[in-house]
């Protein structure tokens, strides 16, 4: 029986993938660097900012001495975008509200920093449905490592087969599958609705 639904945030509950791409490029532009959209989708999508900066140091010659400044600048830019653009989405509120009333435990497990996770959940009006939130600051290894999902399951006191994870990008899907939980891959935030989630749960429970 599925007792918990674990959500990635960016690209699943919040349409923020472009925000991260654009704000990191805005920060990098200060030093004359840029990430192409092709590079972003192939390499960087879904990774924490610090990991992206480490890759840029290896591939683009970015000085490691700039990591802390760029990370801080990027987070400041991201917060401004959240305040400006992050708004409630009815079908998400409806889905999480129904699942919550049905007794499902709901958790966000994101590669973003805690301040971004909390801000997005607040501005999207989804925070009230969540049992708790996990960010990349709550684990040692970010996705694609499964640690964040295993941490959530341990805190929920649930086994992997009792959890359904919603993910949208390669790094997140890899982490979700490695955790041993059931995985629902979504193409965009529009795929995250009550009907699809409940159908997925029904299918899983019918098989198992």
Image (tube, helix red, strand yellow):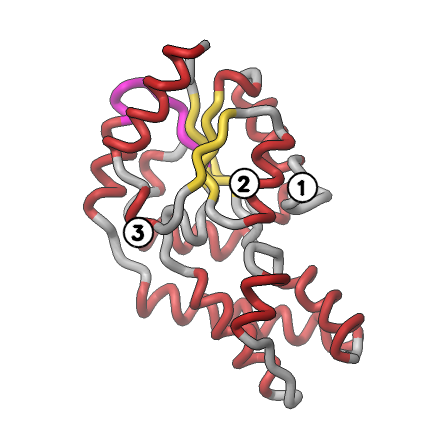
Residue at mark 1: 139
Residue 166 at x, y percent in the picture? 44, 37
Residue with the mark numbered 3: 124
Q: Is residue 101 left or right of residue 112?
A: left
At mark 1, the secondary structure is loop
At horizontal 65% and vertical 36% (from top left) the residue drawn is 146
State the CA–CA distance, disc 1 to disc 3: 24 Å
User: Is-magenta flag for residue 101?
Assistant: yes
Mark 2 is surrounded, within 10 Å at the Cα level, by few (under 14), some (14 to 19) or many (20 or more) other residues, namely many
Q: CA distance from mark 2 to mark 1?
A: 8 Å
The answer, for residue 106, to whether it is visible in the render is yes
Q: Residue at the spot x=74%, y=78% of the render?
A: 60
- Where is the C terminus found, in terms of image quarters? top left
Span colored in magenta: 99-107
User: Which of the two residues, 136 or 176, is positioned nearer the viewer here?
Assistant: 176
Residue 181 horizontal side relative to residue 206, left or right: right
Circle 2 residue: 134
- The residue at the point 19 percent across, 46 percent down is 90
């Amino acid at each position: 029986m599925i007792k918990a639904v674990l959500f990635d945030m960016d690209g699943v509950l919040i349409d923020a993938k472009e925000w991260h791409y654009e704000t990191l490029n805005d920060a990098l532009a200060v030093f004359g660097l840029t990430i192409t959209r092709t590079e972003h989708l192939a390499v960087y999508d879904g990774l924490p900012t610090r990991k992206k900066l480490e890759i840029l140091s290896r591939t683009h010659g970015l000085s490691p001495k700039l990591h802390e400044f760029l990370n801080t600048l990027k987070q400041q830019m991201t917060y401004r975008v959240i305040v400006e653009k992050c708004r409630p989405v009815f079908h998400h509120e409806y889905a999480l509200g129904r699942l919550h009333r049905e007794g499902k435990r709901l958790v966000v497990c994101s590669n973003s920093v805690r301040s971004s996770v909390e801000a997005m959940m607040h501005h999207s009006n989804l925070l009230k449905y969540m049992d708790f939130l996990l960010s990349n600051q709550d684990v040692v290894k970010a996705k694609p490592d499964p640690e964040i999902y295993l941490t959530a399951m341990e805190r929920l006191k649930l086994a992997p087969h009792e959890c359904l994870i919603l993910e949208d990008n390669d790094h997140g899907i890899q982490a979700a599958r490695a955790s041993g939980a059931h995985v629902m891959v979504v193409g965009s935030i529009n795929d995250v609705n009550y009907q699809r989630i409940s159908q997925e749960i029904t299918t899983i429970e019918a098989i198992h």
